Image: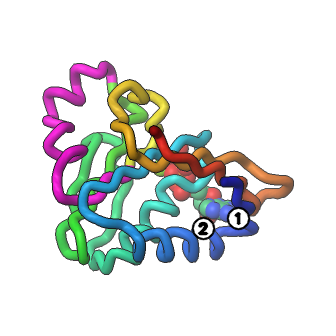
Amino acid sequence: MRKVIHNELYTKRFGIELAQKLKPGDIIALIGDLGTGKTTLTKSIAEGLGITEMITSPTFTIVREYMSGRIPLYHFDVYRLSSAEEMNELGYEEYFFGQGVCVIEWADKIMELIPQGSIIIRIEYGINEEERIYHITNIT
Ligand SMILES: Nc1ncnc2c1ncn2[C@@H]1O[C@H](COP(=O)(O)OP(=O)(O)OP(=O)(O)O)[C@@H](O)[C@H]1O
Ligand SMILES: [Mg+2]
């Protein structure tokens, strides 16, 4: 599915609406260049899940856990991952096959680890500064 996101407000609306449909075990793989809005989208998903904690970019920790919402949120940013082995070391399977929702920024770096059934959102820049194009698919 292709969706045109006109500006940041639409990103937020999209994230909040997506969050309503999420259930334990769901995985959202975000793929998109620097500044396409992966963290912004993740924050809106968190808001939609009712998470009250402040969402910070997990860049130096790979994963952060937020437990205050309707479902736990595991926010990954694998941009600085040095090897897939590092994912094993942090016990990613506990997260991916657990009872929370995983959102993974830069998921293309670990595509071989992304399970079937995950939702992939590939984000591209649109025709102006504010616009983004979402390409939403399911891994089957
Ligand atoms: N439609 C939009 N959706 C989301 N963010 C937008 C949009 N239009 C403009 N922006 C701006 O783009 C920036 C997106 O930053 P954000 O940190 O969310 O991107 P990112 O994809 O997580 O970047 P990184 O690759 O560094 O992790 C913000 O400054 C935001 O204000
Ligand atoms: Mg980010």
Span shown in magenta? 82-103
The x and y percentages for residue 75 are 32, 53
Specify the amino acid type for callout 1.
Ile
The x and y percentages for residue 128 are 83, 57
- The verdict on label 2 being within 8 Å of ligand 1 is yes
Q: Is residue 134 above or below residue 66?
A: above
Q: Quadrant of residue 91?
A: top left
Identify the secondary structure beneath mark 2: helix
The x and y percentages for residue 22 are 36, 67
- Identify which residue, 72 or 114, lies in the foreground: 114
Which residue appears at 70% of the width and 60% of the height? 3
- Chosen colour scheme: rainbow
Q: Quadrant of the C terminus?
A: top left
Q: Quadrant of the N terminus?
A: bottom right
- Which residue has dot 1 on it? 5
- Which residue has dot 2 on it? 11
Q: Does 135 appear in magenta? A: no
Identify the secondary structure beneath mark 1: strand
Which residue appears at 28% of the width and 79% of the height? 52
Which residue appears at 36% of the width and 69% of the height? 46
- The verdict on label 1 being within 8 Å of ligand 1 is yes
Cβ atoms under marks 2 and 1 closer than 8 Å: yes
